[in-house]
Amino acid sequence: MNNQEVFKRYRGRIIGIILAVIFSVLYLTIGLGYTIAVFVIVLVGYLIGKWYDRDLDIGAYLEALFGRRD
């Protein structure tokens, strides 16, 4: 199994571990409040970039959050 196959199979776990390490380092160095602020700013930047790429579908997000579940 090559590296690309491993990444495809365990992509969510790998990304989750990387994000947890980043969050932990930020928490230990700058504190919880600043860490949350950094992640909020990154999220806003991500959403602006997604909107700029015309790939942001707010209706789908709202439907997923507040839509009826059968």
Image: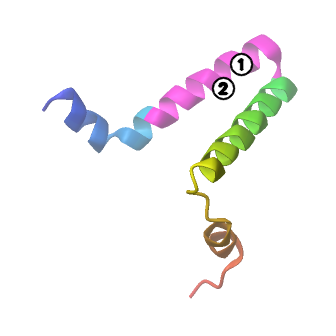
Identity of the residue drawn at 58% across and 56% down:
54
Q: Secondary structure at mark 1?
A: helix
Question: Badges 1 and 2: C-beta atoms under 8 Å apart?
Answer: yes
Q: Please tell me how crowded label 2 is: few (under 14), some (14-19), or many (20+) other residues with Cα within 10 Å.
A: some
Magenta span contains residue 28: yes
Q: Is residue 44 above or below residue 23?
A: below
Image disc number at residue 5? none
Q: Is residue 31 above or below residue 10?
A: above
Q: Secondary structure at mark 2?
A: helix
The residue indicated by pointer 2 is: 23
> Is residue 17 or residue 4 the one in the foreground?
4
Q: Quadrant of the C terminus?
A: bottom right
Amino acid residing under circle 2: Phe
Amino acid residing under circle 1: Leu
Percent of width and height locating residue 49: 63, 43
In the rendered structure, which segment of residues is drawn in magenta? 15-31
Image disc number at residue 26? 1
Identity of the residue drawn at 70% across and 34% down:
42
Residue 2 as seen in the image, left or right of residue 66: left
Residue 11 as seen in the image, left or right of residue 50: left
Identity of the residue drawn at 49% across and 30% down:
17
- Residue at the extreme bottom of the image, as rendered: 70
| Magenta stretch prevailing secondary structure | helix
